[in-house]
Image: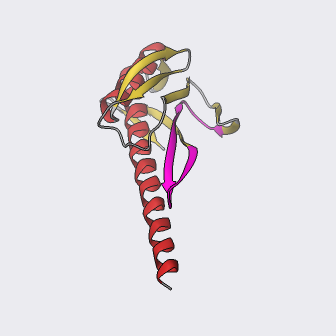
Amino acid sequence: MFSAIFLIFNAVTLYERVQSDRNRVTQALTLALQAATAQGAIAAGRQVTWDAPVAQTAAVQAVDAFLPVQLAALAAHGAQYSPTTAAPPDWTGLVTLGSFQTSNTGGTASLFGQSQSVPGPFVAATVSIPVTERFLGVPLSFTLEVGRVMQVYGYNGQQFTEYP
């Protein structure tokens, strides 16, 4: 009975740590896409156009600001970061912002090899982190992956309206 309780406690603790990491990364990705929209979207009347390099730079800087990472390298559609000493000890490799995409019109966003139809202008990206958790002393390695598409509906005179 004690063994079963111990096993369940460890499983729940592991699950909570993974969910905490996932929530943290999802929040950072959301803020990065919002920064990309704020700095890289350009109002052309009520339409949205993108300065894609500016948007990507804003997203790259936002990830660096919201996660305990340091920029290691820029990539064509994202960036790689090294975890800092403040990062969770289970983050065991480079953090990657990838698949950064913008579109002035509706189209298809491709994240993790899957396509999603988006009816209007959008910005999208993924963040992935190699993680090694220990469950009863056994290392479990996997990649925590989070992706997000944010549709941008237009400019209201002061800011762009986004819908996740």
Question: What residue is rendered at 49% in x and 28% in y?
Answer: 97
In the depicted view, which residue is nearer to us: 115 or 37? 115
Extreme residue in the right direction: 114
Count of picture labels: 0
Q: In this view, does 79 lie above or below 31?
A: above
Say if residue 14 shows up in the picture: yes
In the depicted view, which residue is nearer to us: 125 or 12? 12
Residue 116 in percent (x, y) is at: 66, 39
Question: What residue is rendered at 46% in x and 49% in y?
Answer: 22
Instruction: Examine the residues drawn in magenta and state their main secondary structure.
Output: strand
141 in magenta: yes
Residue 122 in percent (x, y) is at: 53, 31
90 in magenta: no
Q: Give the range drawn in magenta.
A: 117-142
Q: In this view, does 8 lie above or below 163?
A: below
Residue 68 lies in quadrant: top left
Q: In this view, does 139 lie above or below 128?
A: below
